[in-house]
Image (tube, helix red, strand yellow):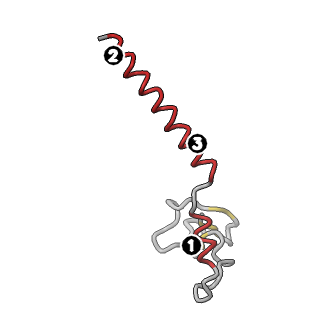
Amino acid sequence: MPWCASCSRYLSPSTVRADATCPECGRRVEPLGAPEAPSASTGAGAGAEAELRSVPWHAKLLAAAVALYLGFRGWQGVEWLLDKL
């Protein structure tokens, strides 16, 4: 999420201008965490980026539970249709 240091506020990505400046003060904004990012030459940031982009376990569990539930309800619908025929 873009951060404007001079305005001390977060900006939504859609409000940032095409040249990456703040719509209020006109200064360049930086993505959150950019100053603390490790150097690309050291390769230390590769693991951190992979960790940030991975899906949390509870989201995977929720997706599996939803798929199981919808599959069960779909099977019930098929049984109901076959019973009505």
Q: Nearer the N terminus, badge 1 or badge 2?
A: 1
Residue 85: image x %, image y %? 29, 11
Q: Are marks 3 and 1 in contact (CB under 8 Å)?
A: no
Mark 2 neighbour density, 10 Å: few (under 14) some (14–19) many (20 or more): few
- Per the image, label 1 sits on a secondary structure element best described as loop
Q: Which mark is residue 82?
A: 2
Task: Please tell me which residue is depicted at 52% across the width and 61% down the height of the picture.
Answer: 15
Residue of label 1: 26
**What's the distance in space between the residues labelled 3 and 1, CA to CA?**
42 Å
Mark 3 or mark 2, whichever is nearer to me: 2
What residue did someone put label 3 on? 62
Residue furthest out toward the top: 84
Q: Please provide percent x and percent y for residue 84.
A: 33, 10
Q: Nearer the viewer, residue 39 or 77?
A: 77
**Of the image marks 3 and 2, the number of the one nearer the N terminus:** 3
Dot in front, 1 or 2: 2
Q: Is residue 47 above or below residue 24?
A: below
